Amino acid sequence: MQCAGCGTELADGALLCPGCGRVVQSGNQAGQSSVGERMSKKDFGELPGIKFYLNEIRSGAVFLYISAGVTFLASTGVFHFMDGFRVTLLDAVLILALGIWLQFGKSRIASILILVVGMTGMILGILQMGVVRGYLIPIVGVMETIATFKYQKLWKQYQKTGEVPDGAVRGFKIF
């Protein structure tokens, strides 16, 4: 069977065209209502453009897990390179919780909180030590805010119209 949109050869039982991301209609699906033909959020996540945003979100969460580990070790005094920079176990737990919320919730609120927590930590570091430290978490916060907002926007657009948005199929635009 071939995709009606782009002509790509489809595997038996395929729900999405790997070439254009179009929802495949088999003979028994053609008579169903448009709601029944909609793909799940998991299938939506398999589209090429959406995969980029999901990978970005996952990468940011992994960075936060590593940051939480480093912060935990610094709070226990294991890392001496952070002497003078006050970190607590609460900081590590907060970073870990935000990473989990980001990865599994793909939450815009979590991404904004990451940005706010990162900026707050960086500003406090500058005030405490007079040196810019902790600038990676705000950078990750910006990237995750962009990724979560784009992902949620495309998903809501698909839910509203039932049509796969162009940005979900063709690729991505950061800005």
Image (spheres, rainbow, N blue to C red):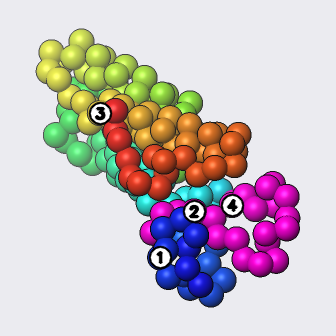
- 3 vs 4, front mark: 4
Task: Mark 2 or mark 4: name the one nearer the start of the chain.
Answer: 2
Query: Which numbered mark, 3 or 2, is in the foreground of this view?
Result: 2
How far apart marks 4 and 1 lie (CA) works out to 19 Å
Q: At label 1, which amino acid type do we have?
A: Thr
Is residue 23 on the magenta stretch? yes
Which of the labelled discs sits on residue 22, or is there none? 2
Q: Which is nearer the eye, 113 or 147? A: 147
Mark 1 or mark 2, which is nearer the start of the sequence?
1
Residue, disc 3: 139
Which element carries disc 2, helix, strand or loop?
loop
Pointer 1 residue = 8
Which residue is depicted at the point 44% across and 33% down?
A: 145
Q: Is disc 1 surrounded by few (<14), some (14 to 19) or many (20+) residues within 10 Å?
A: some
Cα–Cα span, label 3 and label 2:
34 Å
Question: Looking at the picture, which amino acid does disc 2 mark?
Answer: Arg
Q: Secondary structure at mark 3?
A: helix
Residue type marked 4:
Met
* 68 falls in the magenta region: no
Residue type at mark 3?
A: Ile
Q: Earlier in the sequence, mark 3 or mark 4?
A: 4
The circle on residue 39 is 4
